[in-house]
Each structure stands twice: as C-alpha cells, then as structure tokens.
Amino acid sequence: MSRNKFLTDISMSTVQAVLNQVSGIIVFFILSKYLSKAGLGQINWSLAVLMVIFSILGFGLEHVAVKKAATGTNTGLLLQAYLFHVLVVGCGFLAMLFIIQFWIPGVYFDKQLFFLLSVSQCLSFFATPFRQIVSGLEKFKALFVMSSCANIIKVLALFVLAFMQQVTVIMIIEVYLLASAIEFGICIFIYRVSLQLPVIPGYNRQGYLSFIKEALPQLGITIFNTALARMDWILLGILSTSIMVAEYSFTNKLFELSTLPLLILAPVIFPKISKMFASEENGIPEKKIQYLKILVQAEIVVAVWVAMAMNICWKDIIDPLTNYKYGSSTSEIIFIMSFAMPLVYLNNIFWNILFAKGKMNVLFQIFFFAFLINMTADAVLIPLFHAKGAAFGFVIALAAQTVFYYRKTDVPIIKKAFFHLFPVMASALLAGLISVYLVNPFIWQLSIATGMYLFLLYIMKELSFKDWITMKRVFVSSI
C-alpha cells in the first residue's frame, strides 16, 4: 500500500469521524438546551432500545460484509444477500410494531413517538449494506458522504428550528425521518452511479444462506456488544427516571465523543488487521507486530489524556452550553466513566485481532460474560446510585471485558502493552489533581496538567522519540 493512499484514507476517515462526531454533538447540545430533561430522556431511551433491536435484526452481518468485501468477494452477490436481509427483517419489524400499536387499546403519544423513531432507524438500517461494502473496498471518499449526510441534515434542520423556537419532540422526530430517508437515497446513488458498483436485484437462496451462516457466530457478539453499550440507558429508564436517563445519556454521549481518535483509525485499521491475521499461517513479520504494540501504547496515552482534559474542563464548558442543566449535575458521572476510556481503545485492538483470526466463539464468550456482569452491576447499583450507579456498572463491565480479552488473545507482545495502562493512568490522575489545586482557570489547569502528564510519561519511559518515529510508519509500509 502506498504512503499517499494510506494518508488519503486516514485523512478521509479523520474528516468523516470529526464531522460525524461534531454534528452529533451539535444535535445533542441543541436537544439538551431546548428540551426538558424528561423529553430528552424519553427520546434517548427510545433510541437506545432501537439500537439494540436493530443490532439484533442486523444478524452481525456488518463486520462480515466488510471482511468479505476487503478479501475480494463478488460485491454484486454480497450486496444482493445483504440488501435482501435488511429489507425483509426491517419491514417485518415495522409491520409488527404497527400491528401492536394499532390493536393495543389506549395508544398514546409515547407509542407513536417510538414507532416514528423506528421508521427513521429502519431507513438508516436499509442503507447499511452500501456503507459496509464501500468500507471494505476502502472507498473512503464515498463512505464519507454516505456516513455524513444524515448528520449534516439534522444539524441544519435543527439550527433552523432553534432559530424559529420550534424545537419540540415531534419536530425532532420529523427531522430524523427526513435525514434517514435522504441518507438511504444518497447511499444508493453513490453506490450505483458514482462508484458504478453492481446492484443485482433478486434473491439468491444459496448466497443468502451462506452469508447468514458465516455471520451467525457474530450474531451473539453483536447483540451483547450493543446491549453492553446501551443496556445501562434502558435499565435506567426502567429502574429510575427519564431525568436520570437524560443526565446519564448526555454524559455517555460525550464520553463516546472522547473516542474520536479511535473512530478515525478504526475504519482504516480494521481491513489491514484482517489481512494481516487472515494469513497468519504464513507467519506475521515481527516488525508488524511491533507496530501494533506501539499503536496500542499510543492509543492508551491519547485516551487517558482526553479523559483528564474532559474532567478538568467539564463544568466550565458544559454548564454554559446547556443552560446550566448538565455540567455540575453530571461531573461525578463523567469522572467515573473516565476510567473506562482507555479500556475502549485497548479492547478495540483485542477485538480486531480475535475477529481477524476467526475466533468467534471466544468473542461471544467475552461479550456474554461482560454483558452479564454489566446487567448484574446495573441491577444492584442503579436503584442505589441512579445515574452514577449505571456509570459504575459500565466501568466494571469494561474492566472485566479487558481482562477476558487479555486472557484469550494469543499475541504476547500485544498483551504486554496492557501493562502500560497503569502508569499512564496514574500519571494523569496525579497531574490532574496537582493542576486543579495549583491554579483556578480551567485553561491554565489543562495546560499545567498536560505538561506534567507528558513529563511523567517521559521519565517513566512511556514516551520516547524512537516510538514516535516508528509510529509514523505504522501500517504504511507493506501492510
């Protein structure tokens, strides 16, 4: 792979990730500012439930489609099988939901809200096959447009509604519907007209069953992974109040924003790790494994710094942006969740390796046990501590998942990178605490904390110029 091609892919992935995250945060801040906590909690709870439902309906085909496209599978037949699946199960779900809503007496606005949001999510679901195949083919410019259009439409529409003072729950749902419909149309247009990739109509029974069979081991993994990401929102809505859902989901959304570097790297790295470990029987050069180790170390350093920065700046930035609704009231939640931030990065690398090596049973076990731990922790802690209890449950589950990954990933040099986590986190905690006590304005606190953090990492040999030089060649040469 040429250096220019790699840099272009990274650039497009960076722009896409930044734009999508910034757009998502703008949407979230507009909703947080103009809706009541109860209204925001109601929408976020519905979206969390739908996220789990559509992950189940997706059958784990997303990553399999990327892998098959990346390894040279006929894209026409692949799209045929994938598109048939999403159209059948998506329309079936909407039909079932409509019948339930129609026949159950006492239908009220909440059920209509859930149904309309379901239609919106279903339209995005229909666009998934086009995005995943394009990602596997490493067509990142096309993927950028496919993945960004819906968020851009939402931002523009909500700005107009905010200017007109018309940000209501029903208007927000109408914006979601419009954005998803346009996204579906754009994905079809780019795939067929711009990229000139084949769209073969019809149903190929053998191809579809083969696709489903290959994805079945991934189904349980996908279900438990998604449930792990959103079950705390759902349980909060059941065991606590919509206000707690609003506070926790707001914090959790910004926590997800903090993984922006991972979102930039993931679409570019995943196909390469798949190719690397798919040919493992031929032996993997030690240099490439060393690159992976340095990548893991760098991700941990970045993740921990982001966590430290978020905690220092949280109240001073979030309170003014949300009319003082979500800053001080959620500062303890984000502090708890910060301990999971580097674990997300570390677990992503472990997952990529195990998935590329085809160890689906191992991945299923890891997600299953992490899910059980999360459910148990949430069931105990949410009634006692509400949103903070959900945050504790999330961190406990991610920590358990990391331990499971560590035990099951048979790449010794990568496993050694796990131990870099502890001195890096200790450095950030010390630097953050000292800076907060030394000065008052958060800008100075962040500056002092960052300098101290880097100094501590340097003297503990967690940062070196040699590693930086090596990182510049990660996945560029011959990967």
Image (spheres, rainbow, N blue to C red):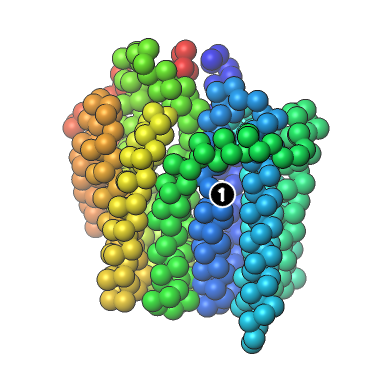
Residue 350 vs 337, above or below: the answer is above
Report the front residue among 65 and 20: 65
Query: How crowded is the residue under tag 1: few (<14 C-alpha within 10 Å), some, or many (20+)?
Result: many
At x 29% / y 65%, what residue is drawn?
A: 376
Q: Which residue is mark 1?
A: 58
At x 75% / y 29%, what residue is drawn?
A: 198
Q: Is residue 262 left or right of residue 294?
A: right
Q: Is residue 289 left or right of residue 115?
A: left
Residue 447 vs 7, above or below: the answer is below
Q: Is residue 67 left or right of residue 460?
A: right
**Residue 61 is at least partly visible in this image:** yes
Report the front residue among 328 and 120: 120
At x 68% / y 31%, what residue is drawn?
A: 77
* Residue 328, quarter of picture: bottom left
* Residue 235, quarter of picture: bottom left
Q: Residue 463's spot in the image, x, y percent?
A: 27, 29
Residue sitting farthest toward the right = 193
Q: Residue 205's spot in the image, x, y percent?
A: 66, 38
Residue 391 vs 89, above or below: the answer is below
The quarter of the rendered structure image containing the N terminus is top right
Q: Helix, strand or loop at disc 1?
A: loop
Q: What residue type is disc 1 on?
A: Gly
